[in-house]
Image (cartoon, rainbow, N blue to C red):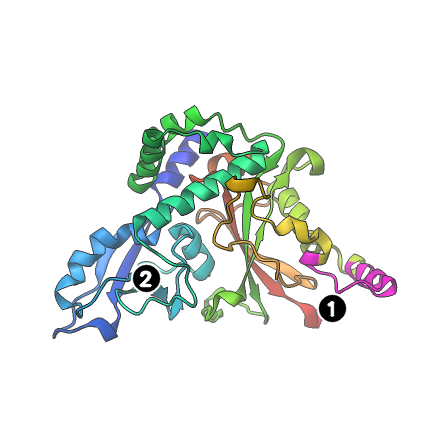
Amino acid sequence: MDGSEAKKYVWEGAIPLQIHLHESEVTTLPAPPPALVLGPRNGYLPLLIPLIKPHFSSTLPPGLDTVWFDYKGLPLKWYIPTGVLFDLLCAEPERPWNLTVHFRAYPSETLSPYEGEDSVKWSFINSLKEAAYIMNGNCKCVMNMSQPDQLMLWQSVVKGDLECYTRIFSRLKFGTIGEGRIPVRLYLRIVSEKLNDLEDLPPISSWDEIRYINRPVELQKYGVCSLRDALESLLPELFMPKSSMRDLRMREKESGGGPSGIKSALGPDDFEVIKNTGDEAEQTHNIASTEVDSVESSCLKLIRIQGIEPNLDLPFSWAANHLKNPEHILHICLYILNNESQI
């Protein structure tokens, strides 16, 4: 598959969804059947509300809409692309993906405030600023967009219009992916027990079970050429031989350092979403976490990018160019099996 075909595949990718209204909000008998819709991989769940609400409107209780979704009881973060949520939460792809929609009782203690489509739009724009800063050292190309271009770019994402997106995006002079800093978001799902089959993996009950690394891959610095090289530059301990990990932990103990792990190996500054640039500084909904747990004594069980389980020998620049999301960030989901008891 060449690059243009891959990009078209990504933009046309969609997940069949079967969306149920939460039983506490059903006011009629019989209960309404689930809504069947296609959720674009590059889209966001709130963008489906105009399709879903008419299906359930006749049975909703009185009150103001505060729409949110859950999967097996886990409230879904509205600013994470739908395809990333699916890859991260469904170890064994579930088709259709059964979600529950709520129009009341928004879980503000778990989810960031959501105030309609504009919330999703500005989250997208802020992520685009973040990517621009990582690649160019500033986000002026995004900040200087005209309002019409900004609106057209967003509408191209909403409608899945690759042609319009490509036309508008080319005006940004964003830079090319080939060398330098590449924006990457890693989502780590740690499997704490040995499983022979991912079907046996219990559902996630809290977002505390997911760890994030929001850090660029530096092609020149690390001499990165493959996906394996990129992951190794971000998670060196995941690929480190067991003997080397033991030596590292011993040296840390002798030097009085803390336990080895992602945080100690990479340093705290590697978890910044975007550096402070004065009034232009933006943080992306706390997507990066400085509380990333150690993955020492672990191994990579599964990797997914845009629903694909790629070979680790895949050229990283190809993946970054053609599998990135519209905000110019490559989202990678990792299932990591903890084998600590075996070491």
Left or right of 79, for residue 221: right
Q: Which residues are magenta?
A: 245-263
Left or right of 58, for residue 342: right
| Residue at numbered disc 2 | 68
Q: Nearer the viewer, residue 79 or 115?
A: 115
Q: Amino acid at mark 1?
A: Ile
x 70%, y 36%: residue: 221
Mark 2 residue element: strand
x and y percent of residue 78 in the render? 38, 55
The residue at the far right in this view is: 254
Position of residue 108 relative to residue 281, above or below, is below
Left or right of 251, for residue 241: left
Quadrant position of the C terminus in the picture: bottom right
Q: Residues within 10 Å of mark 2 (few under 14, many from 20)?
A: many
| Contact (Cβ within 8 Å) of mark 1 with mark 2 | no
x and y percent of residue 48 in the render? 27, 52
**Which of the 4 quarters of the picture holds residue 16?**
bottom left
**Which of the 4 quarters of the picture holds residue 35?**
bottom left
Residue 323 visible at all: no
Mark 1 residue element: loop
Sooner in the amino-acid sequence: mark 1 or mark 2: 2
Which of the labelled discs sits on residue 343, or is there none?
1
**Which of the 4 quarters of the picture holds residue 138?**
top right
Position of residue 242 relative to residue 218, above or below, is below
Mark 1–mark 2 Cα distance, whole angstroms, equals: 42 Å
Look at the magenta stretch and give its main secondary structure.
helix
x 51%, y 43%: residue: 330
x and y percent of residue 334 in the render? 55, 55
Residue 9 covered by magenta stretch:
no
Q: Nearer the viewer, residue 25 or 73?
A: 25
Q: Looking at the image, is mark 1 or mark 2 nearer the viewer?
A: 2
